[in-house]
């Protein structure tokens, strides 16, 4: 395995230190993994909301608009 050295801004070095301790990995392992992902063209996942994930399901059911808030629909339930 070849050795390289690089300079990091203090803020990036602090993040690397913190994450490597949290994950129980060496800084070298963290940098190798990140570099591999970058060179392979892996894109970081975008944060997605639950509404976006279930977007095609929203509005697919029919029922009263106040079903979740009106207690009259619970009368007799569980008897």
Image (tube, rainbow, N blue to C red):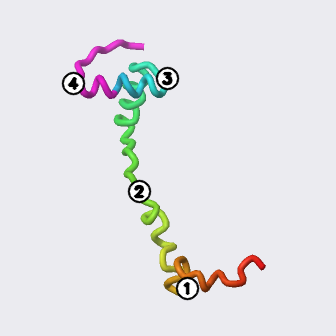
Nearer-N-terminus badge (4/2): 4
Confirm or deny contact between disc 3 and disc 4 (CB under 8 A): no
> Which percent across, then down, holds residue 5?
28, 14
Q: Nearer the viewer, residue 35 or 67?
A: 67
Q: Residues within 10 Å of mark 2 (few under 14, many from 20)?
A: few
Quarter of the image with the C terminus in it: bottom right
Which residue is at a point 36% across and 22% down the rendered structure image?
17
Identify the residue position indicated by label 3 in the image. 24
Identify the residue position indicated by label 1 in the image. 62
Spatial CA span between label 2 and label 3: 27 Å
Q: Nearer the viewer, residue 37 or 44?
A: 44
- Badge number at residue 48: 2
Secondary structure of the residue carrying numbered label 3: loop
Q: Residues within 10 Å of mark 1 (few under 14, many from 20)?
A: few
Q: Nearer the viewer, residue 43 or 67?
A: 67
Spatial CA span between label 4 and label 1: 55 Å
Quarter of the image with the N terminus in it: top left
Spatial CA span between label 4 and label 2: 30 Å
Does the magenta-highlighted stretch encompass residue 13? yes
- Badge number at residue 9: 4
Which residue is at a point 41% across and 56% down the rendered structure image?
48
Which segment is the magenta one? Answer: 1-15
Q: Residues within 10 Å of mark 4 (few under 14, many from 20)?
A: few
Spatial CA span between label 1 and label 3: 49 Å
Which residue is at a point 37% across and 45% down the rendered structure image?
43
Nearer-N-terminus badge (1/3): 3
Nearer-N-terminus badge (2/1): 2
Give the quadrant of residue 29.
Answer: top left
């Amino acid at each position: 395995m070849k050795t390289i050295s690089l300079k990091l801004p203090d803020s990036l070095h602090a993040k690397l230190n913190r994450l490597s301790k949290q994950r129980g990995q060496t800084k070298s392992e963290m940098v190798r993994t990140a570099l591999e992902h970058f060179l392979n063209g892996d894109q970081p996942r975008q944060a997605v909301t639950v509404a976006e994930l279930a977007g095609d399901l929203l509005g697919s059911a029919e029922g009263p608009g106040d079903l979740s808030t009106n207690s009259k629909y619970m009368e007799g339930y569980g008897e």
